[in-house]
Amino acid sequence: LGMLQKANLRVKPSEGISCGFWNLYTDAALYQSLGEEGYILEINNEGIFLKAATKSGLFYGIQTLRQILPAALENATAATNRIQLPQLYIKDIPRYSWRGTMVDISRSFFDLEYLKDHVDRMALYKMNRLHLHLTDDQGWRIEIKSKPELTNLGSRGAVEGGRSGYLTQEEYMELQTYAAARNVIIIPEIDMPGHIYSALLAYPELSCDDLSNIEPKMATPPQLFSGTKVGWSKLCLTKPEIYDFVADVIEEMAAITTGPWIHIGGDEIEDDLYEEFVVKADSLVRSTGKITIGWEEVTKAPVNSSLISQQWHGEVESVVDVKVIESICTSFYFDHANIPGQEKTNNWCKKSGVTLEEVYNFQSENNNVLGLEAPVWTEFVHTDEDLDNRFWPRIIAVAELAWSEDTTKNYTDFISRLKKHEERLINMGINYFPAEELGWKENTNK
Ligand code: NAG
């Protein structure tokens, strides 16, 4: 029961669910077959039994139990009477180890409180990686103690209509601890060498050109950038001192990051020295003991084979054989509209938007897939409500694809199961998008 409470289920023992007992077996073969995250959940006349090799496995068994319990329990004030549970036996092991989402907190800021809620919700659906796009042209959102101007100045802006702000290192670490307790690892992204105007504004010596002359024409004196144009800013790759900056930032991020990965961005930039930059940034990351992740462009460079490439177009001819995370924009860019529905949007990758069914129908063509990750870029997604209805319910399709083998894949069946989650999502305060085939009510509870 303690674990149920830990799993965020708000039940009071005195008002009582009575479960059997938690039983951790010591059978080595069984443990091995369950791997890092698998579990067995059995409910029979004797009680509720959960077996797993790891804490993560136990956590996921509890999340499944949580989904079997009445949705009313997600609401702290709900009364709990006796609950009858079905008898069942579930052996459940994930397909992929990477089941992620990305939140762009640069274009519009999302604070610690929202990010904690987001982690809770991800955990219920057994998602385990939260990638934070911490920096971009419009705003620098993480405190770097050795470079105070990044947040003093660089965090003040946002895209037009978006929110500014930043996470202190303490907040970042608090989120990380909170997430770790829910088996979610945070991946920090510092986007380099492009998408970096907020840092250039804070430290103009990192730029080749006078900031008032770079495109899109900045005012004199240069100001924060609140537009949506991409691919125009960059670190001056001919200046050796940019590497001191890059090293300082990577080292500070590595020191406060408990997960094994640092994301260096690397998207949307043309520069003769780009490949050299990527190789150096990758080796700086590795020298801190972390593993580098980059957007797929980084595989144009002869990087170390430990690097992980995040596919978004799936078009770059890679010169290295590396593992990939699938974030292909036609299926997983959730800043793209749910159809019919969102107006304020930039459907550059897929004009018609990305439907729930299209997410579910994704098939990977890569052999070397670590898993799936759905990003939400926030040029047009400014508030908590907006972000909720970009993620939900499409994120549940990602969760299912990343957890279950293709052999059980069936959209009609998925929809009939997903329909039953309406009340649970409402009770969790999620401002979902009511996709037509679900028949869910409009949800304006936030
Ligand atoms: C791309 C940019 C991103 C932007 C997004 C909008 C990547 C890797 N880069 O242009 O900064 O916000 O698309 O969908 O996606």
Image (cartoon, rainbow, N blue to C red):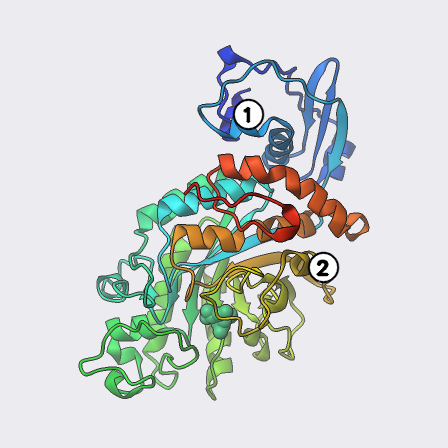
Q: Identify which residue, 43 or 317, lies in the foreground.
A: 43
The kind of residue on which mark 2 rests is Asn
Identify whether 255 is placed above or below 90.
below
Label 2 within 8 A of ligand 1 by Cβ: no
Number of callouts in the render?
2
Image coordinates of residue 350 in percent, x first then y, are 59, 71
The quadrant where residue 254 appears: bottom left
Which numbered marker is on residue 353?
none
Residue appearing at x 69%, y 38% in the figure: 38
For residue 257, side relative to residue 372 (left or right): left
The quadrant in which residue 28 appears is: top right
Q: Between residues 308 and 115, which one lies in front from this camera angle?
A: 115
Q: Is residue 250 visible?
A: yes
Residue nearest the viewer, comparing 76 with 253: 76
Q: Return the residue at label 1.
A: 4
Secondary-structure class at tag 1: helix
Amino acid type of the residue tagged 1 in the rendering: Leu
Give the CA distance from mark 1 to mark 2. 33 Å
- Residue 158 vs residue 437: left or right? left
* Residue at numbered disc 2: 361
Residue 109 x/y as whole percent: 35, 57
The structure residue drawn at horizontal position 41% and vertical position 66%, both measured from the top left corner, is: 379
Front of the two marks 1 and 2: 2
Is 10 located above or below residue 29 in the figure? above
User: Could you tell me which residue is drawn at 55 percent across and 41 percent down?
Assistant: 123
Mark closest to the chain's N terminus, 1 or 2 = 1
Residue 265, percent from left and from top:
47, 69
Q: Residues within 10 Å of mark 1 (few under 14, many from 20)?
A: some
Q: Residues within 10 Å of mark 2 (few under 14, many from 20)?
A: some
294 sits left or right of 38 in the view: left
